Image (cartoon, rainbow, N blue to C red):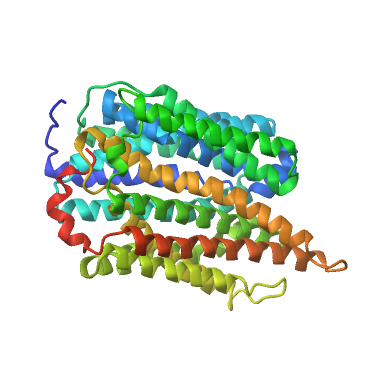
């Protein structure tokens, strides 16, 4: 392992800005197309039943390749891979912007996800390289964790404005200048350490194909439920079994057993997966409700997400850090997830004529606060205590959990929503039937958050995060 050059203090602030901006961009692109989906579907002739693949394809590639991206950073250098991923992301964004059909757009989204899978774990590892162990690093981790939640809402706000005034293609093109600015700022980053070993390409390919098969099977089950659904479901199970065998026998496994040996770290990643599952589905249903039922324009839809952004800012910037300093991480996560679950119950009161001031906007504020609290605590819990040789993998796993959770959660709850809509009595007005499906899907998201509460209680050790500070010398770097 090579040594790490100590960062100059005057560059630490710029380094954090670059790393946070990269995380914001990668997460933002997971949702930036959401508000523009109806316009994209019309413009490229994508059936409504297949529109969710524009979202899912990015999340699937991002989450499925994150572990390989983290390992690549370990082997070839974090700053170098950070730059490589940014260039790949930039090129894929250009391809998406000029896409002439749905297939090309989905391919571009997959390539964007692959670039993001290289950038995100390198960014988190470089953060730990830049900031010394203790309160300074924990504060930087808090900023990074907040970007994970805030980026999703920022994508909705920006996507609405771009779709309304410049056209949906600028949802893709806007990434280019941002990525170039982040790329220019990488001179402030330390090179990062490098480890010896090999890249587990078979493991990366197997787990990505397994997750893709699983998401496709779940997605297809909601619409068809035919033999092909069973084929892809069985393939997912078989490929996951092969992945487990590869990880146990490989000389340089993509997911070393030691990474998940700590029960609290396992719990933090499971909670992040459940948060991702609920969050992406909630944005999907809220966008359809606002544009299909309330007939909001893309711009108004984006602005209507402001309470969510404000809530995440309050939760991650004010309430979360204060709770983290005074209570156990387990307690902080239980509070955050309970608030988020209550917000989903609030959303279930939506009706076609519902006053947005009574449900839509305040429920978003509450949900944002809960998720903001949860993202920071789960991020800290997911990377603490990791051995240096597995640090990039642990960094990737935190993001993997959120992205794969989003892909699986959306596939599951989209099917639940369709079943709830079609199950309404004959003669039910279409707006009422659709709203019933959307609210049922959001109640399902609340179920994911309640499962996260249970995971926190069962898996996380009841120790305050600030007591862990002396041990975070083993954080990713």
Q: Residue 248: which quarter of the image?
A: top left
Residue 203 drawn at (x, y percent): 42, 27
Judge by depth and name the residue closer to the eye, 93 or 235.
235
Judge by depth and name the residue closer to the eye, 298 or 89.
89
Q: How many marks?
A: 0
Q: Residue at x 57, y 55 (%)?
A: 281
Residue 99 drawn at (x, y percent): 64, 31
Residue 36 drawn at (x, y percent): 63, 48
Q: From the image, which quarter does the N terminus lie in? A: top left
The answer to whether residue 42 is above or below residue 111 is below
The answer to whether residue 425 is above or below residue 164 is below
Q: From the image, which quarter does the C terminus lie in? A: top left
- In the displayed structure, does residue 439 sit left or right of residue 179? right
Q: Residue at x 58, y 53 (%)?
A: 160
- In the displayed structure, does residue 79 sit left or right of residue 32? left
Evaluate whether residue 54 shows in this view: yes
Q: Residue at x 77, y 65 (%)?
A: 433
Residue 312 drawn at (x, y percent): 41, 63
Q: Residue 54: which quarter of the image?
A: top right
Evaluate whether residue 185 shows in this view: no
Q: Residue at x 32, y 30 (%)?
A: 71
The answer to whether residue 314 is above or below residue 261 is below
Judge by depth and name the residue closer to the eye, 132 or 262.
262
């Amino acid at each position: 392992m090579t040594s790490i050059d100590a960062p100059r203090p005057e560059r630490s602030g710029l380094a954090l800005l670059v790393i946070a901006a990269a995380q914001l961009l990668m997460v933002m692109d997971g949702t930036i197309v959401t508000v523009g989906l109806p316009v994209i579907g019309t413009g490229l002739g994508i059936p409504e039943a297949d529109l969710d693949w524009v979202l899912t394809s990015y999340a699937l590639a991002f989450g499925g390749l994150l572990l390989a991206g983290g390992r690549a950073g370990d082997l070839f250098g974090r700053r170098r891979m950070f730059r490589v991923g940014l260039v790949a992301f930039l090129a894929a964004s250009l391809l998406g912007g000029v896409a002439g059909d749905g297939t090309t757009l989905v391919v571009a989204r997959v390539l964007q996800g692959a670039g993001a899978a290289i950038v995100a774990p390198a960014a988190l590892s470089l953060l730990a390289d830049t900031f010394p162990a203790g309160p300074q690093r924990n504060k930087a981790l808090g900023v990074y964790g907040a970007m994970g939640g805030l980026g999703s809402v920022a994508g909705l706000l920006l996507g609405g404005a771009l779709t309304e005034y410049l056209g949906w293609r600028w949802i893709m093109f806007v990434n280019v200048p941002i990525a170039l600015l982040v790329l220019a700022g990488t001179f402030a980053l330390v090179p990062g350490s490098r480890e010896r070993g090999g890249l587990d390409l078979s493991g990366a390919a197997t787990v990505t194909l397994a997750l893709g098969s699983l998401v496709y099977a779940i997605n297809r089950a909601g619409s068809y439920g035919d033999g092909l659904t069973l084929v892809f479901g069985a393939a997912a199970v078989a490929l996951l079994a092969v992945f487990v065998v590869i990880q146990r026998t490989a000389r340089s496994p993509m997911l070393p057993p030691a990474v998940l040996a700590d029960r609290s770290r396992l719990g933090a990643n499971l909670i992040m997966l459940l948060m991702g599952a609920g969050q992406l589905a909630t944005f999907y249903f809220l966008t359809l409700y606002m544009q299909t039922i309330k007939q909001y324009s893309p711009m108004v839809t984006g602005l209507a997400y402001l309470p969510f952004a404000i809530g995440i800012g309050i939760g991650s910037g004010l309430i979360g850090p204060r709770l983290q300093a005074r209570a156990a991480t387990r307690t902080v996560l239980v509070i955050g997830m309970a608030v988020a679950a209550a917000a989903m119950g609030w959303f279930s009161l939506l009706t076609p004529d519902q006053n947005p001031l009574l449900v839509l906007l305040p429920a978003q504020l509450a949900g944002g606060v809960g998720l903001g609290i949860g993202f920071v605590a789960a991020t800290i819990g997911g990377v603490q205590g990791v051995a240096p040789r597995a640090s990039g993998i642990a960094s990737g796993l935190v993001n993997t959990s959120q992205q794969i959770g989003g892909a699986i959660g959306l596939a599951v709850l989209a099917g639940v929503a369709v079943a709830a809509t079609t199950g309404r009595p004959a003669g039910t007005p279409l707006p009422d039937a659709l709203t019933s499906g959307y609210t049922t899907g959001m109640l399902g998201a609340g179920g994911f958050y309640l499962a996260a509460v249970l995971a926190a209680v069962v898996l996380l050790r009841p120790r305050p995060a600030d007591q862990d500070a002396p041990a975070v010398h083993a954080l990713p770097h």
